[in-house]
Image (spheres, grey):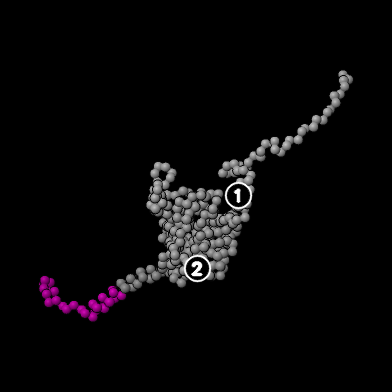
Amino acid sequence: MGGKKRKHVEVEVPAVKKDEAAPERPKRTLLGWKEKQQLHESTTTTGGGFRNREKVLVTCSRRINYRYRHLMLNLVSVLPHCKKDNKVESKATKGATLNELVELKSCSSCLFFECRKHKDLYLWMSKCPNGPSVKFLVNAVHTMEELKLTGNHLKGSRPLLTFSSNFDKDPHWKLLKEMITQIFGTPKEHRKSKPYHDHVFVFSIVDDHIWFRNYQISCPHTGADKIDRGGLEKMTLIEVGPRFCLNPIKIFGGSFGGPTLYENPFYVSPNQIRSLEKRQKAGKYAKKVKAKTRRKMHEMTNPLEADEFADMWKE
């Protein structure tokens, strides 16, 4: 078996020219295939600009009322850029706890619903971790389940924010307008949002209170997706809900505390209102007691004359 070994000859592979090679495969994106030149243009245009990365943490205190919990869930369903968290104990140290939670959840703002005595609802609206923050008393609460309104809009769509002209009068209203714009405005191209504007958030100031309404933008159209000619002029607003009223109490310089920037001089706490009502009820009882004593004194000073026919039938 001693055959000759076959000589190994190295064969040179001819180099392939770049022109003859297959074209480079375009990069695939969520919107389809994108050429290299288009991809470079899009990165150069969007890379250097500002991108809104606003995220809002929404949570509540323990022992919250069911109506107020439903209101919080309604707001969570309306804000696609928010994150819901477990309940937090409303103690003196709640500010540090909430700031830590906001940092853990990678958020920049916080909406904290605090319930006191199973009756009163307070809303903390804060920019974390440096502030400012606002404390509101929430009145006139009506959830979507209560109202049963006919309006309906796409879940996750971006809202239009409208403010009444009163917000531009005083500096504290301007600050509140900016905070509401940042917290309630859904960022563009957020992963949970849809690129449509089919509803409006309305914030209006009446009697130094902020009233919130949510309306669907309804356009008349035929069976096709296109809107009829002149249909934009016939647009109507249909209320969706929820409804609530915010009474500002204090504006703080820090997050959930700090120096007081503004204090509402017209604010009256619910405890004071309840005590006044009790005093009024106690005043009614005191009036009744006084009337009884007055009647007795009148009977003693003005006795009835003896009737001459009173003993007539006794005989």
Q: Which mark is residue 272?
A: none
Residue 225 drawn at (x, y percent): 43, 44
Image x and y of residue 253, in percent? 56, 67
Extreme residue toward the front, this view: 19
**Which of the two residues, 302 or 34, is positioned nearer the viewer here?**
34
User: Residue 270 or 180: which is nearer the viewer?
Assistant: 180
Q: Residue at x 59, y 64 (%)?
A: 130
Identify the residue shown where x is 41% and y is 60%: 140
* Amino acid found under the numbered disc labelled 2: His
For label 2, the crowd category at 10 Å Cα-Cα, with few meaning under 14, some 14 to 19 and many 20 or more, is some
Quick one: SS at disc 1? helix
User: Label 2's element?
Assistant: helix
Residue underneath mark 1: 42
Q: Earlier in the sequence, mark 2 or mark 1?
A: 1
Q: Label 2 vs label 1: CA separation?
A: 40 Å
Instruction: Say left or right for 82 vs 218.
Output: right
Depth check: 285 or 147 in front? 147
Report the quarter where the N terminus lies.
Answer: top right
Give the residue at x 49% y 63%.
177
Magenta region: which residues? 290-315
Does residue 311 show up magenta in the picture?
A: yes
Q: Residues within 10 Å of mark 1 (few under 14, many from 20)?
A: few
Query: Residue 50, relative to residue 168: is it above or below?
Result: above
Q: Is residue 150 magenta?
A: no
Q: Amino acid at mark 1?
A: Ser
Read off the residue under disc 2. Answer: 172
